[in-house]
Image (cartoon, rainbow, N blue to C red):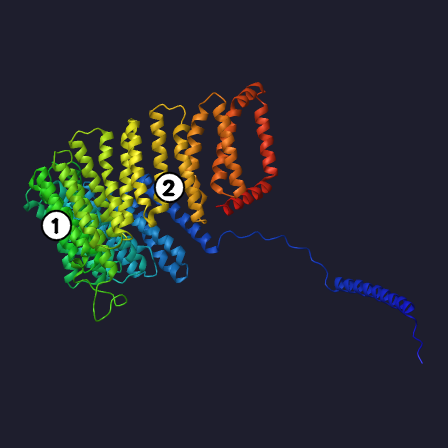
Amino acid sequence: MENVPPPAQELVLLDRELARLDARRAQLLARRAWLLGVLYPATPSAPPRAARETTPRSAQNVLLTLGGLLLAVAAVAFTLVSWGHLGIGGRAAVLGAVTVAALAAPVALLRRGLASTAESVAALGLLLTVLDAYALHRVALPGTEGLGYAAVASGVLAALWTAYGLGARRLRVPLPAAVVAGQLPLPLGALAADAGALSLAWAALLTAAAGTALALWARPAAAVRWVACGAACAAGAWAVLSGGRLSLVEGGAGPAALLLAAAGLALYAAWHAPAAVACASAAGLLAVAGAGGLAREALPQGWAVPGYLLCAVAVAAAARRGPVPRGAAVGLLAASAVVQALSVVWAAAFLVPALVRPGQGVPWPVPVVLLTVAAALAVPRRAEARSGAVALATAAALSLPAALGLPSTGTAVSHLVLTAALLSLMVRPAVLTRGLPAPQAQAGPATGAVPAADREVLGYVALVCALVSAGGAALAVAGRGPAGVVVPGVVAALFAGAAPFARGTVRAVAACTGVLAAAGCAGAGSALASLPAHHAALALLCVPAATAVAGALLRRHPVALPVESAGAAVALVALALPVARPAYLALVLALCGIVASATALRPERRPAAGYAATALFVAATWVRLAVSEVSAPEAYALPVAVPALVVGVLRRRRVPEASSWAAYGPGLGTALVPSLVAAWGDPDWPRPLLLGAGALAVTLVGARWRLQAPLVLGGSVLGLVALHELAPYIVQVMGALPRWLPPALAGLLLLAAGATYEQRLRDARRLRETLGRMR
């Protein structure tokens, strides 16, 4: 049998055994560390290696570039400065030997795999050939003309560099350098021959053609193609700018032929180059410039813009109908669109002043340009193009009376006829959508109907054009006797007659335009009758009264609300006219209140119109009291306020869910606000006391019955009365206090407000919720 010790004794034994194991582990670890130190002695640590900031190849390129530049500088200095110390043989021997060595060394370097070094040495050799040409001119041909020799030398160097680059194909410098040198012979030769600007432009164009051919035909390295392309663009731009300037300043067939040749070159590049759209756009613009220059010579003075425009239309037709690739066609169409847009801007510069200031003439090319662009836009089967065609045709029609020199009445009549035609298109825009394709996703394959959106777009365009035409008609006869009254009336009749047949936003805008035109008719009639402004306000009130009647007849028709809104806008204008005559202002306010009250009888307009009627009547009463210099407004306000409150009580009994603002707001406002205004200017105490007591009673009633309007209105008036009564004492106290005390009190107040901000927000939220639960 085993004797098992008690738990306490066994725990002591286990603790002792664990302690002995820990001590033995520490001895073994120390021995192991010593053995590792004996077997692998420590070596001194190497200093940290600095981070490399450049790669070997970049460092190599920097060294080679600096070396080549230094050698080039030395060669130039030797040629220009130290040349005179040697004889003819010495000069030739030194330069020849150095040049041959510099051109031969890259071949050997390439064989050894030193490509970068070979490029640097080859660049030095090319520079030495230029110095050789310079030295040859100074020594052997000192009498040769400089520009002519430079032209020949650049051509010879271009040929030599080309041969050298083809012989050493692994070198990347010679062939691009040859391309750059090849740009100089023809322009330098033209300058040497004292040729004119046109000949110099032709030389640049031929150089650009050679660069284009090299970039398109040959298959050299990418660097050579890019250099050739850039050189061709630079030379071509120089030629085109020179030719364009000559075409505009001097004219003639020479600059036109140059521009047309440049257009042909750009079109050829568009046919074969990847950047087809850009090249074709340039070709289209150049073709328009060249052909338009020829047309300008044949056309009478002032018809240059139509000539250029016809050339642009011809370019667009060729792009659509001719065998032109898609990219080139897009570029040609873009160029034509730019010219057409510029032509329209030119025409608008004449048309807009003629519309704003009637009687100003318009040259005949203006309608021709507008009609031409409109016809060009009518060709594509797109709703956007048709919309532009409608707009430009409208502009052309608007410019015809000014071009014909019609009197103001004839101009207004023509504009009215145009307005009627445009309104018919607005009502039936399907006439403009004939021939337009319908997307399969929106129109069935059997019907082929045009999407409803394209009808709508054309309807909007027709509406805008009709508005412009109607405005032009009104401006043409503004202030010109009875015609100034008749024309706005006709405009009102046209838009009012077209509105019921339209739909959506178009209908609403047309109806509102009819209302505003009627207001213009009333205003023009008042001006014709020489009525003062306060009498004209009464005439304008006929318009909102008529719109209120029309709204009552139309009931819930969608056009009713826009018509009444436009009438309300006219009423605001009528209210602004008699401001200088308060008595008439009170009359106008009362009449507007009557119109609003009549509108409030309709259920769908009752809330908004009722509030407006109350505000208008109250304002009319206050203005009337101010005009009569009444010092006790309560005698006039209370007889109105008491019946209003009785009506509110009866309404609340009949409709318990009605708002307290609708029931009691008008009566309370009529009773309290005039007295409050009078109390602020009253130095005595009875009125503020009685008003404060009344406001307190109203506030208590609102709090007792939980009504929002009495509580807010009564509390506001009570607070303002209290502030009015305490204001003199506050002023006295502020004058007696030290100047440092108010800022200190303000600071303490801010600190207190900041310390209790969260609690105040909670209280404000609770107050808002309490008011929200009231009626």
Q: Residue 683 at what x, y percent from top left?
A: 47, 20
The residue wearing badge 2 is: 611
Q: Which residue is mark 1?
A: 371
Quadrant in which residue 729 is drawn: top right
Label 2, label 1: how far apart the Cα atoms are: 53 Å
Image location of residue 593, percent across then percent down: 32, 38
Q: Which secondary structure lies at badge 2?
A: helix
Kindly tell me whether residue 668 is visible in this rendering. yes
> 539 or 460, which lies in front?
539
Picture quadrant where residue 584 is located = top left
Against 3, is 143 above or below?
Answer: above
Image coords of residue 252 (percent x, y): 8, 45
Label disc, if present, on residue 210 of the rendered structure: none
Which residue is pictured at 61% across the width and 35% down the height?
752
**Amino acid residing under circle 1:** Leu
* Number of numbered discs visible in the structure rendering: 2
- In the image, 478 versus 171, the foreground residue is 478
